[in-house]
Image (cartoon, coloured by chain):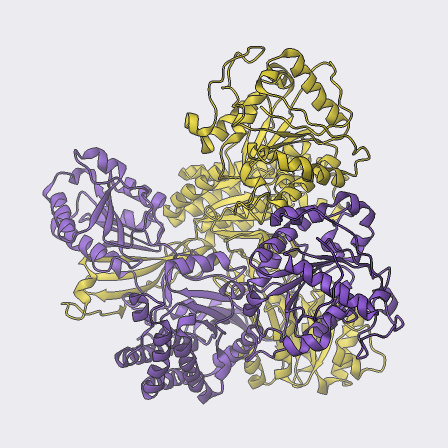
Chain colours: A purple, B yellow
Amino acid sequence: MLSQVYRCGFQPFNQHLLPWVKCTTVFRSHCIQPSVIRHVRSWSNIPFITVPLSRTHGKSFAHRSELKHAKRIVVKLGSAVVTRGDECGLALGRLASIVEQVSVLQNQGREMMLVTSGAVAFGKQRLRHEILLSQSVRQALHSGQNQLKEMILVTNLDFHDEQKRRNLNGTLHELLRMNIVPIVNTNDAVVPPAEPNSDLQGVNQSVTFGTKSRVGMGGMEAKVKAALWALQGGTSVVIANGTHPKVSGHVITDIVEGKKVGTFFSEVKPAGPTVEQQGEMARSGGRMLATLEPEQRAEIIHHLADLLTDQRDEILLANKKDLEEAEGRLAAPLLKRLSLSTSKLNSLAIGLRQIAASSQDSVGRVLRRTRIAKNLELEQVTVPIGVLLVIFESRPDCLPQVAALAIASGNGLLLKGGKEAAHSNRILHLLTQEALSIHGVKEAVQLVNTREEVEDLCRLDKMIDLIIPRGSSQLVRDIQKAAKGIPVMGHSEGICHMYVDSEASVDKVTRLVRDSKCEYPAACNALETLLIHRDLLRTPLFDQIIDMLRVEQVKIHAGPKFASYLTFSPSEVKSLRTEYGDLELCIEVVDNVQDAIDHIHKYGSSHTDVIVTEDENTAEFFLQHVDSACVFWNASTRFSDGYRFGLGAEVGISTSRIHARGPVGLEGLLTTKWLLRGKDHVVSDFSEHGSLKYLHENLPIPQRNTN
Amino acid sequence: MLSQVYRCGFQPFNQHLLPWVKCTTVFRSHCIQPSVIRHVRSWSNIPFITVPLSRTHGKSFAHRSELKHAKRIVVKLGSAVVTRGDECGLALGRLASIVEQVSVLQNQGREMMLVTSGAVAFGKQRLRHEILLSQSVRQALHSGQNQLKEMILVTNLDFHDEQKRRNLNGTLHELLRMNIVPIVNTNDAVVPPAEPNSDLQGVNQSVTFGTKSRVGMGGMEAKVKAALWALQGGTSVVIANGTHPKVSGHVITDIVEGKKVGTFFSEVKPAGPTVEQQGEMARSGGRMLATLEPEQRAEIIHHLADLLTDQRDEILLANKKDLEEAEGRLAAPLLKRLSLSTSKLNSLAIGLRQIAASSQDSVGRVLRRTRIAKNLELEQVTVPIGVLLVIFESRPDCLPQVAALAIASGNGLLLKGGKEAAHSNRILHLLTQEALSIHGVKEAVQLVNTREEVEDLCRLDKMIDLIIPRGSSQLVRDIQKAAKGIPVMGHSEGICHMYVDSEASVDKVTRLVRDSKCEYPAACNALETLLIHRDLLRTPLFDQIIDMLRVEQVKIHAGPKFASYLTFSPSEVKSLRTEYGDLELCIEVVDNVQDAIDHIHKYGSSHTDVIVTEDENTAEFFLQHVDSACVFWNASTRFSDGYRFGLGAEVGISTSRIHARGPVGLEGLLTTKWLLRGKDHVVSDFSEHGSLKYLHENLPIPQRNTN
């Protein structure tokens, strides 16, 4: 084995062996020789990585989130990481970014080591003159002691000499102590390392295996073996692709930050199932749930409602724990959202019973029936979407509510709650599973471990069919950004307009503006921009609106046209596309209804827009032409809400243009499937010269059972 | 001005000035001082970038796609690109990846130059010893002449001396000739360059402006001015963010490949509108289209159908041009798809008239009516989705068909066709616009320039609401991968199953299998896996199926269980999840209907799955439990088709679970909006102590006018 160590003030010395390798990050590409295992194994032959000591002192991490506590990190680079894909020498960009990452981690106070691939050894002659790597590291670390460098050449035999091993061990420790990043360059081709063996020490054992081609072990098998060997010594291992251009600039730091990059090896069995297993359980549990009778699903929800009141004491006890742990760490409004009470649980139970009632006619409803030919009938029926991922913030009452919606619609559910509500969520989830188990579908609702990163969950596109964020618009935006290939249902913006037409009734306007803006200004369906017909300026109606806004202490921002009409204007708006979410309102002047529509299309968010007028023609023109999810005439923007629309249980409000738009009821959690029942029907019978003709008769649909 | 040039065999010499700067790629971050302009301007003071010559010889590129022809590329790096965001020295990773990209482009035979930021000059002392950059370049280029290096220090005054300018010019040219990448390091702080001026030459003009703070010009303004100045000299400029971690590894090569990275400056006015402008036109045109009467939309489609036959000669002439240009470059089946004929145009016109007929009841249909309170009525109506992007391959007949679907559903449309059908698409699009103009909505359908990259279009999420790829499943997969934040409607896989139950009728099975597998094996609804109940093995029914498959020359792949039942098995499947798309079929044995369902859920693609049985209970169990878009009983998989389902115009087949699933008719191009008509209704009247109560009465829906 050939080792190349850049050192500073090298001297052989004896000292006690230190516990070694707290965490190994093995970083490599997926497409090169499995040299990882050789190095990991070869450490077993090196005295300064004595296995017993590691075993005594070290214990591998149970979860990625603990990797950030790693004190010592070894980064092993495969040949494909170090060299360019086109075989044009070193991959400078990658190498330098690895050096940068190593430097970042070292500056955080960690002990860092680089192990480079054997392939580099062949470039040693060249590197000796180029000193590229060493300088990069030195430069990045601002080391003041960048003087001496010397090659330490060791071969396999050296490791079998007790004294030499001690010296090497001491050298590396001294280098680390001096804040230097040792680079160990290995070359399998020169001296293949030995098979892992219980008889590890002191024996000049013969070489029993070597490169991949010689023993036929390669790919993942070798890597997994290496990782398991390292784990035995209490070393956690992550194997990741180091060549992907989009991630290689931050893959090492990402791993240390606990992100789900590559494969994490841990000796400690995780407490529960993995999130992938939970996804599978939610899928199959959901499928079972979907085939239950609607009455059975309603029964589960009723039982859950009962449990919420019956098990009140246990729930409140768990909630108290959360509150105690959050005390002093969360602001008062957040603590209030976190806290449960008897009355909250009671109204939650009432809400659940409403969901149960509205669920009766959701799954399996026939939407369309067609006779395609004699004895060939087509049916389009509603079915659940599949597996939902619902991400919610501190409010634990969200859990039973969302679970009831999923149960009512026959969907499997992955729930990801906030860390601060962990105790409350756990008990509420247990009660949900208890309710589900009355019909044997306990696994349909899964609570994801709080340690799972939301970003990682949003990438499980094979597992999750729809993501629903429940929380602030910031949460929705974050999720929309993080979701890869999975649709997200939600609204991130609500810039609602009210256009006051020249034919508006004086009595109505003030009432409508006050209700839309002042009733609950933080809601997404609150008014943000008031568009006023220019003929209304300096009329009593206009003065009345302004007076009301003054009384209600609404801060007015003037649009540019409005400002130009005024002698003394209030502050001009920074942007006409602003969601204030507070007692603030933008006022702008428009020439007519078309001008208002153009403004709404330019600056609105297609959420909810209102016209106030007594002229029916103008109103209809507005209703037809405004391209928003909700368009109202002489009604407050605040009606834009699933409950107020009479949709029963409210899933949310969607500003998406496909699938569901505007306030979404249970129907938003459903899709359809097509059932075709025939008697030996083949397509070729319907061809030009076939014996059959398509009938395509619409058949009556069973009347919808609406409440 | 301080210049630092690594040279090889430097000698001053006189030679004729060469035309300079064919293409400048100015590469910088968005957050640093606008030093770009200073350099670009300062070139005006350097004789070897004489403006008149550039003007005479050079002409900037009109389109990004031409950038790949750039012979000489200057890469200017801003300070923020060169240095780390945390102010910990050089950004090694970025720098090295830039060097790699420069090297790649140089190895393609281009003349490359690097201009580094002034900030680097302050690190000159350090760099002198580190020689990091020069070595990286040298290493990457495998230069054999990496010996001499020398500093050339010049100041502003030097450029005003004719002889010195000539020498510097010659030096740079000689360096380029010797395949060396000159690195020009500039420092504004030392010598601020002069204001651009018509009096550029030979004058020792006084310095009139300097850094940002001195003249107050910065940010985009300065960059744009610099770009315009460069353009005057016939130099194309791209300004891009060089610090984004996801792109910095390939931003320069991406720009040269013509990708839409950063801002492209061109003096040549583009022939038509930009794709962003086209998106705007499609949006507003589509909105106008949506407000037409259904009869008017149908009229447009009928007119287009007429034009297809009336203007047949012109269309076929354009198509002939495409065919001639494609001759020898396209394979015979592709040429066949590209070619139009009188009969193709006639049947296209017939199809269009069918779409017109089915469009009558699509937009504006009332789906739900609710009386929320007295005089407060809610309506949910169908509306177009907005702007569709349809990407299609060589078949030009796709264009009028897709245009008719968009017109029928009131959507704006961006069409992106294949380059090989450019002439045909152009005339067909002109005819579409002619038809649209009869109701003044000419701009609703836009044909995107063939030079636009599909990948770039798929990122216009503010502009496009739905992408529909029409073509091979590879195209669909590519588009699904490329689409950022825009839903894609399509299916990428069709792994359809047929389960032959123990109670299957002997007569039916063979007919159904033959029709499903052999009628059109390339279709996505063709059969791929036959699941046979184990009781049927070694029965006459089984032999009959195998005999039929042999006659039809279907190659059989045995699933592992099936193989284990046979003495001499056919080749075993590589994967049970295979879409053969050919006369090949996987056969596997299952124990019962549940086993069949489990197999389908594990290996299927949720497209179309069939049960063949005479037992109604088993059939219903299968229909209810299989979680696929289409589930059939005793019918061929091939019925899974919009036309056969009687949906009228077929938009496609969707394997997505949201919005539209299975065969999609015009309804898949629609969404809904909510209209609320009130008389001064406010939410606060419905509060606990308010005067009003919600009624939520379902009102009758106008009966659907079905054909």
Q: Is residue A193 above or below residue B133?
A: below
Residue A564 pos. (x, y %)? 22, 33
Left or right relative to A530: residue A226: right
Front one among B13 and A80? B13
The residue at the far right in this view is A206
Height in image: A558 above or below B114?
below
Which quadrant: the N terminus of chain B? top right
Identified at 56% across, 71% down, the residue is B628
Q: Nearer the viewer, residue A412 or B704?
A: A412
Q: Looking at the picture, how far across and down is residue B446, in whole percent?
A: 50, 40
Q: Quadrant of residue A180?
A: bottom right
Specify whether residue A463 is in view.
no
Residue A436 seen: yes
Task: Point out residue A99 in the picture as x, y percentages from the top left corner.
Answer: 65, 52
Where B97 sits versus A379, above or below?
above
Quarter the C terminus of chain B occupies: bottom left
Q: Position of residue B599 (x, y in %)?
A: 65, 77
Between residue B542 and residue B608, name the one nearer to us.
B608
Left or right of A615 on screen, residue B122: right
In the rendered structure, the answer to whether residue B55 lies left or right of residue B405 reads right
Q: Nearer the viewer, residue A490 or B655?
A: A490
Q: Please tell me whether residue B644 is drawn above or below residue B101 in the rendered image.
A: below
